[in-house]
Image (cartoon, rainbow, N blue to C red):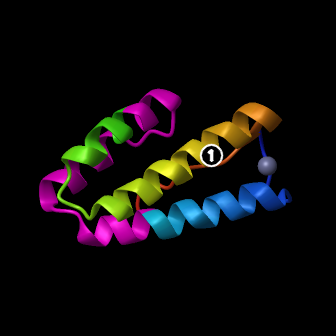
Amino acid sequence: MTVSDDCDECRKIRLELRDAWMDAWLSADKEFRSAWLGLFGGTEEDAQRAEDLLPKANIEPKLAERVREAIMMKFRHETQTGHKIPLRRNIT
Ligand SMILES: [Zn+2]
């Protein structure tokens, strides 16, 4: 897989991931934050664990849903194109 910065779709998804993540992060509780940080290696397995964690976190359902959709969008695009969209481990 190659990192593709010149792909419009990659750029769009990366921005959406960042925004969705930021909103969810700011409303998340402390336990969720530390659990999340520990699992975000950027692999599909990590994303699956993130999806399992989201419903348990004390964040607004619509924020969690947005993150989930952004992650799904990322993997769908990567699968279709072979592009690699990096996930950010830290948001600060
Ligand atoms: Zn792309």
Q: Residue at x 37, y 64 (%)?
A: 63
**Residue 47 forms part of the magenta stretch:** yes
> In terms of secondary structure, what is the magenta stretch mainly?
helix
Estimate the x, y position of residue 66 in percent, counting from the top left: 46, 59
Q: Residue at x 61, y 67 (%)?
A: 15
* Image-quadrant location for residue 62: bottom left
Instruction: Classify the position of the N terminus by image quarter.
Output: top right
Q: Is residue 5 left or right of residue 29?
A: right
Q: Is residue 15 left or right of residue 82?
A: left
SS assignment at label 1: helix
* Image-quadrant location for residue 38: top left
Instruction: Classify the position of the C terminus by image quarter.
Output: bottom left
* View extreme (top): residue: 45
Residue to which mark 1 is pinned: 74
Per the rendered image, the range of residues in magenta is: 21-48
Few, some or many C-alpha atoms within 10 Å of disc 1 (few <14, some 14-19, many ≥20)? many
Q: Toward the viewer: 10 or 54?
A: 54
* View extreme (right): residue: 6
Residue 88 seen from this side: yes
Estimate the x, y position of residue 89 in percent, counting from the top left: 43, 53
Callout count: 1
Q: Residue at x 34, y 65 (%)?
A: 24
Q: Is residue 66 left or right of residue 83?
A: left
Estimate the x, y position of residue 52 in percent, counting from the top left: 31, 36
